[in-house]
Image (cartoon, grey):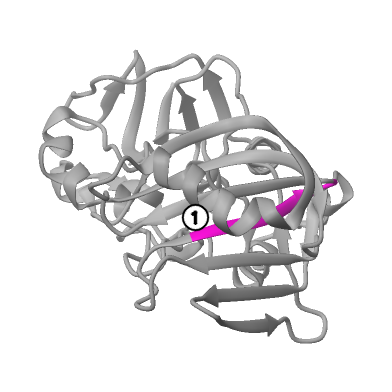
Amino acid sequence: MIYDYIIIGSGPAGSVAAYCLQKQGMKCLMLEAQKERGEKTCGGYLTWSAISLLNQIGISTDYLIDNGAQKIEHLIQLWDKNFITHSHHCGEYGIGCKRLLLDNWLTECATNEGVQVEYGERVQSFSNLGDVFNVNNYCGKKLVFATGARGFVSKDSRIVLSEQSFGISAHIRGTGKINKKTIYFWYLDNLKNDYFWAIPIGGDVWNIGIWFQHLPEKKPQELFYEKANQYLFPEFFGYEYINKPHGAFCGNVNMTSFLPENCYGVGDFAGCNITTSGEGFICKLLPKPVSSFCINFSRFK
């Protein structure tokens, strides 16, 4: 079989791209490197703009709420001795959720439209056979790369990683004085360049982490623990780690320039991450002739 599109990577960006393309009548195959998905600590918050876009393209986020995700009503920004509280307008809200729940739901939406998904397909190379590409012995007319901020081939990484922003995140379970319907940002300086966050993602579980525009001189993990102890843990009566801190690059650099004709990039691969805030819930149109939404949920607003 020759597919219209082969999507490499089945994270949120890849799944939504496959979903939209399949709805347009394209025959899509999505390749996932992992044999079985596990939980990720990166990401964890859907803004109202992201929720609205998902609803517009036919993906209801009610499923997330029904399966334990947390509705978010407020956002609090803190720096020095100042703070600002932002509240959603009537009827609007954000969603804090585990990545595994989100990833599985978006992939299920894609497969419900007819997208074929193959797991355990780590792609390390592809060949151009003229009118089609060969990827792991699958043939497709066009390719969509959703492989994240580290790129795909070695030449991507030579220039990219030094330009990417970086975050460390973890999951904890605990109760305290902070509001489970509120997300928190503690800015590390008055310039609001880097920050520590806490996002409720359902039950008593929180996604916590630290984000840097550029890798700091001090070890990022040391700063994670330092700021968690300074800002967050004094607000808790008790807590435990359920997923230890894990670091990841965020896609600030558009790596599609490395790709040949009829190959496209989405999400972190395409640089869909705002360099001044770490936001990754960005809606972008793929390069023509692919008319499809690209949503990258690797970070949050």
Question: In this rendering, would 185 be left or right of 173?
Answer: left
User: Of residues 59 and 254, which is closer to you in this image?
Assistant: 254
Q: Tell me where residue 190 appears, x and y as whole percent.
A: 38, 78
Question: In this rendering, would 255 be left or right of 273?
Answer: left
Q: Tell me where residue 286 appears, x and y as whole percent.
A: 37, 58
Q: Residues within 10 Å of mark 1 (few under 14, many from 20)?
A: many
Q: Which residue is mark 1?
A: 299
> The residue tagged with tag 1: helix, strand or loop?
loop
Say whether residue 300 is magenta: no
Q: Is residue 248 visible?
A: no
What residue do we see at 23% from left, 47% from top? 217
Which stretch did the figure color magenta? 196-203
User: Of residues 148 and 142, which is closer to you in this image?
Assistant: 148
What residue do we see at 34% from left, 13% from top? 137
Label the magenta part by its dominant secondary structure: strand
Identity of the amino acid at label 1? Arg
Q: Which quadrant is the N terminus positioned in?
A: top left
Q: Tell me where residue 40 appears, x and y as whole percent.
A: 57, 34
Say whether residue 198 is magenta: yes
Question: In this rendering, would 217 be left or right of 209?
Answer: left
User: Of residues 135 and 155, which is closer to you in this image?
Assistant: 155
What residue do we see at 32% from left, 43% from top? 149
Does residue 140 sit above or below 156 in this rendering? above
Q: Is residue 221 visible?
A: yes
Does residue 84 sit above or below 45 in this rendering? below
